[in-house]
Amino acid sequence: MSQSNHFLEKKKSLLFDLFNLYENHSYSLDSAFEIFQEAENIHKEITQLDMELSDVEKEHFTETYREVWEAIIQKHREMMALINVENTLLRNQMTQVNKKDQVIHSYIDKNQSMFIDRQA
């Protein structure tokens, strides 16, 4: 097996590792961040392998595994959508808490205590 074939096989293995990583996630925010970190590591390895391959080999590899790349991109987009939804929900909760705090502070002035003398 030539050096080039070895790099291509390693890249193929990494590509399918990346695919399986996205395919088997649990649709939770925590799992999304873990997957993004692991995907970044795999992507770095693929980039290193690409530096050892010719442009023709890279192009052929991309064409051969185009559907796998597209599936990975789609799963990545789904995870980003999940993160955006969670982000929106968190912002809404923070806004509600801030409004609640504003209402409390408008009724209670911490600097001045007010006592009413009922005998007057």
Image: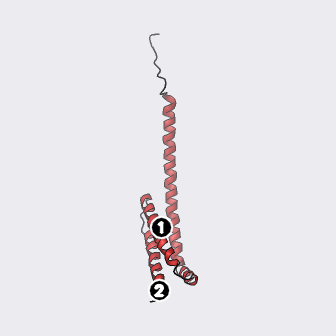
Element at badge 2? Answer: helix
Against 38, residue 1 (above or below) is: below
| Residue at the image position 51 percent from the left and 66 percent from the top | 76
Disc 2: which residue = 3
What residue type is disc 2 on?
Gln
Instruction: Estimate the spatial distance between the alpha carbons at disc 2 and disc 1, rounded to whole Å.
Output: 25 Å
Q: Residue furthest top?
A: 120
Exactly how many numbered labels are in the figure? 2
Residue 53 in percent (x, y) is at: 53, 82
**Residue at (45% x, 76% y) in the render:** 14
Which residue is label 1 attached to?
40
Whether 92 is drawn above or below 29: the answer is: above
Q: Residue 36, position in %: x, y?
A: 47, 64
User: For residue 50, which numbered disc appears in the image?
Assistant: none
Which is more N-terminal, label 1 or label 2? 2
* 39 up-or-down from 116: above or below: below
Mark 1 residue type: Glu
Q: Quadrant of the N terminus?
A: bottom left
* Horizontal and vertical percent position of residue 54: 55, 83
Looking at the picture, tell me which residue is in the foreground, 33 or 102: 33
Q: Measured along the vertical axis of the image, is residue 111 above or below residue 68?
A: above
Residue 20's image quarter?
bottom left
The secondary structure type at the circle numbered 1 is helix
